[in-house]
Image (spheres, helix red, strand yellow):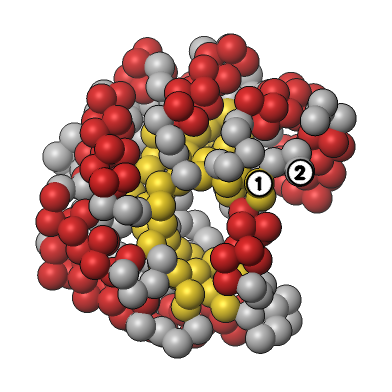
Amino acid sequence: MKYYSFNEYLKNTFGCKVYKIAVNAGFTCPNRDGTLGTRGCIFCSRGGSGDFAESPEKSVFQQIESGKRRVEKKIKDGKYIAYFQAYTNTYAPLEILEEKFTEAINHPDVVAVSVATRPDCLGGETIELLKRLNGIKPVFVELGLQTIHKKTADYIRRGYPLSVYDDAVASLKSAGLNIVTHLIIGLPGETKEDMLKSVEYVCAAKTDGIKLQLLHILKSADLADDYLAGKFEALTLDEYVDIIADCVGIIPKDIVIHRLTGDGAKKDLIAPLWSADKKTVLNRINKAIAALPD
């Protein structure tokens, strides 16, 4: 086994095909409501990373049902993860969080709930709620770290120091929750060594899972202005494959790799355009990983 893939983890854990359904609970983000800023992180689209989620005008149950219908030809007799993806999914009053998450976790075809959030939006009561829900069905908490480097974090307008991530991981670990850390590969100004240091750091912090996300430059993100002004270049396919292979090579085999690349909405994608051919990208990545020493 070169690495522990999310698909393998799901089969081992649930014994069947499991598909993620992106849910939009209608939340916002401290980087958008004026608490920290109004324009979001510099790479973030208007949809707050929820461009593929269902409509927040529907109930959580309705969104799950709609998501099931969209993938019914791909999955037979399988189960689902309700993925609260858009914006910051612990950034709401506790009673609203409990209502939304409970509606998802009680769906008969949902085997787990995944909550994408920021490390600075995880108060004690929220973690206690997630802990209680985790006693019903598994709960994944996905933390948008992106980088460990302060200069880059300031540039992307992340809005919190690395110590906040460390504290969140410690609290979530203490509560017995499964932690998935998001890192972006290809952030402006970072070298391959910088990116590998971020991977090493979150692995040492004992994250349970990791998502490696290619930096996409999207039309609705502020980052597009800097790209179009020539302030940085997007990674080439060869560069990305090389970096990802090196990342996989240093990730311990017990840490689940949830993602090796990512999707940007094709209608909004400015660069890198090669990323739109996801099949080719994944084939190249898997070939490079296969060449890694055991």
| Residue 116 horizontal side relative to residue 170, left or right | right
| Position of residue 131 measured from the top left corner of the image (x, y, whole percent) | 26, 61
Residue 7 seen in render: yes
| Residue 185 horizontal side relative to residue 293, left or right | left
Query: Secondary structure beneath disc 1?
Result: strand
Comparing 201 with 86, the one in front is 201
Query: Secondary structure beneath disc 2?
Result: loop
| Position of residue 203 measured from the top left corner of the image (x, y, whole percent) | 49, 30
139 shown above or below 63:
above
Residue drawn at x 32%, y 45% is 173
Residue topped by disc 2: 1
Q: Which quadrant of the figure contains the C terminus? A: top right
Whether the residues at callouts 1 and 2 have beta carbons within 8 Å, the answer is: yes
The CA distance from mark 1 to mark 2 is 7 Å
152 shown above or below 37:
above
| Position of residue 283 measured from the top left corner of the image (x, y, whole percent) | 84, 44
Q: Disc 2 residue type? A: Met
Residue 4, label in figure: 1
